[in-house]
Image (tube, grey):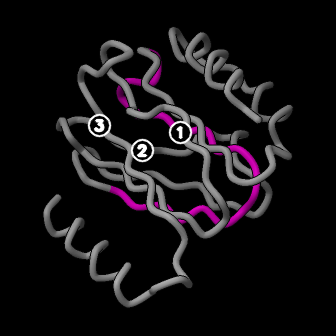
Amino acid sequence: MRRLAALLSATALFAGAAHGATHEVKMLNRGEAGAMVFEPAFIEAEPGDEIVFLSSDRGHNAESIEGMLPAGAEAFKSRLGDDFALTVTEEGVYGIKCTPHYAMGMVALIEVGSAANADEAQAVTHPGKAKAVFTGLFGELQ
């Protein structure tokens, strides 16, 4: 985790204004919203911004959800227990899950620019508690 932070700091120094903002998301066993959460679970970003998922607790990852990516965005899946950096390039909403804790509601939503694919993303079905969590997160869209 420290190596990733150092790498991000060095990248920011050399990239200057050409690099977008960096948003940090913790992957937690317990957070303000309860057990098995991304914190924050809703992120507003702009194209070119970087979303850094920090493995604050082992056993978590960040994975895109099929049907919840903007056109042109590539699916991704990080390794369990590893920090992961995602540069968002396409406008729309990105649905994220922690693979082992998806049904427990460990999901996140990233809004990049306009939420052009929001209707398609909202139509995706989710297991267990993830459905209720996404209902709340979609309520945050601009």
Which residue position holds label 1? 96
Residue at left 63%, top 61%? 74
Which residue position holds label 2? 62
Q: Amino acid at mark 1?
A: Ile
**Does the magenta run of residues contain 97?**
yes
Q: Give left or right: position of 92 versus 127.
A: right
Q: Which residues are magenta?
A: 84-103
Q: Amino acid at mark 2?
A: Ala
The correct choice, above or below, for 72 with respect to 103 in the image is: below
The correct choice, above or below, for 48 with respect to 65 in the image is: below
The residues tagged by marks 3 and 1 sit, at their Cα atoms, a distance apart of 12 Å
Q: Are marks 1 and 2 in contact (CB under 8 Å)?
A: yes
State which quarter of the image contains the N terminus.
bottom left
Image coordinates for residue 51, horizontal then vertical, percent: 46, 56
How would you rate the neighbour count of disc 1 (Cα within 10 Å): few for under 14, some for 14-19, many for 20 or more?
many
- Looking at this view, is 111 or 100 the one in front? 111
**Does the magenta run of residues contain 104?**
no
The residues tagged by marks 1 and 2 sit, at their Cα atoms, a distance apart of 6 Å
The correct choice, above or below, for 107 with respect to 70 in the image is: above
Q: Are marks 3 and 2 in contact (CB under 8 Å)?
A: yes
Q: Give left or right: position of 33 versus 119.
A: left
Q: Give left or right: position of 49 versus 90.
A: left
Which residue position holds label 3? 60
Q: Amino acid at mark 3?
A: His
Residue lying at the far left of the rendered structure = 2
How would you rate the neighbour count of disc 2 (Cα within 10 Å): few for under 14, some for 14-19, many for 20 or more?
many
Instruction: Look at the numbered disc 3 and give the secondary structure of its residue.
Output: loop
Residue at left 75%, top 49%? 92
Image coordinates for residue 60, horizontal then vertical, percent: 29, 37
Q: Give left or right: position of 30 versus 44.
A: left
Q: Quadrant of residue 110?
A: top right
